[in-house]
């Protein structure tokens, strides 16, 4: 057991192969994998057509009990620090372990977590190496990246922007246009729940 606790946050509208690639890596890396579902309060909107219950089921259809799923309501105009504190407080109230690793699908998403999770993109000036042994000097500026148990929180940027898998926006557009391209980009076990619950009024009119 490596005691690493992975965290990934997204809307998953819908869950697609770009998401599952990142989640699969998190499961391989970490003893515990937590997926937070953002915009949990939204449903049947053009950009959020599936309910939180439907999105939870999409994740369960693929992963069963291999991940922990946590719904998150939006905070509105929150700062990155407020947002991460909100997530940590939510997980703590649910009795979940402090995340050690955050898995991001884009640079933009990662920008919300860089104040709390260490990455190579953070200035190397914070890292001062011992001349012998290669250990880290105790630098107070590093403390914010540590869990309560003294484990360094790490940020993993698995950039889906360079992936051949389209975005969730493009997948929703495929459904809107009434073509079946979206099926190539999502797990077969979720085809029914995606199709059956996509509102008819969001699709282009039939000829």
Image: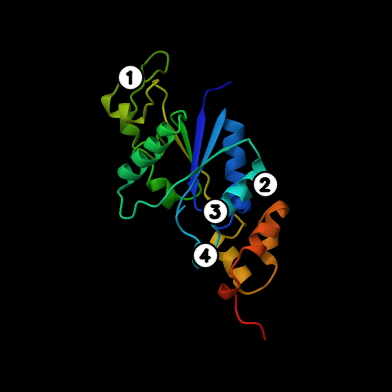
Q: Could you tell me how far apart the alpha carbons at marks 2 and 4 are, in whole angstroms?
A: 21 Å
The numbered mark at residue 160 is: none
- Say what secondary structure mark 3 lies in: loop
Q: Could you tell me how far apart the alpha carbons at marks 3 and 1 are, in whole angstroms?
A: 40 Å
Residue at the spot of label 1:
137
Q: Are marks 1 and 4 in contact (CB under 8 Å)?
A: no
- Say what secondary structure mark 1 lies in: loop
Q: How is the image coloured?
A: rainbow
Name the spot of residue 50 as percent of width and height, x first.
Answer: 55, 59
Q: Earlier in the sequence, mark 2 or mark 3?
A: 3
Q: Residue furthest bottom?
A: 207
Q: Earlier in the sequence, mark 1 or mark 4?
A: 4
Residue at the spot of label 3:
12
Q: Residues within 10 Å of mark 2 (few under 14, many from 20)?
A: some
Q: Residues within 10 Å of mark 3 (few under 14, many from 20)?
A: many
In this rendering, the answer to whether 120 lies above or below 183 is above
Q: Residue furthest right?
A: 188
Q: Residue at x 36, y 38 (%)?
A: 122
């Amino acid at each position: 057991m490596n005691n690493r606790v992975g965290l990934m946050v997204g809307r998953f509208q819908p869950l697609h192969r770009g998401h599952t690639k990142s989640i699969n890596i998190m499961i391989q890396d970490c003893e515990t994998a937590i997926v937070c579902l953002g915009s949990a309060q939204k449903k049947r909107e053009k950009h959020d057509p599936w309910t939180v219950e439907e999105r939870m089921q999409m994740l369960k259809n693929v992963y069963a009990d291999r991940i922990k799923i946590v719904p998150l309501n939006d905070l509105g105009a929150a700062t990155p620090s407020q947002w991460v504190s909100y997530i940590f407080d939510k997980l703590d109230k649910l009795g979940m372990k402090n995340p050690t690793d955050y898995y991001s699908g884009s640079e933009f998403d990662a920008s919300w977590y860089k104040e709390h999770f260490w990455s190579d993109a953070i200035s190397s000036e914070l890292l001062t190496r011992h001349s012998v042994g290669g250990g880290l000097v105790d630098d107070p500026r590093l403390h914010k990246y540590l869990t309560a148990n003294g484990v360094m929180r790490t940020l993993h940027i698995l950039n889906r922007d360079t992936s051949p898998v389209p975005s969730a926006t493009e997948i929703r557009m495929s459904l809107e246009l009434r073509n079946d391209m979206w099926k190539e980009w999502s797990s077969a076990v979720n085809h029914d729940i995606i199709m059956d619950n996509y509102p008819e009024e969001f699709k282009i009119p039939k000829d």
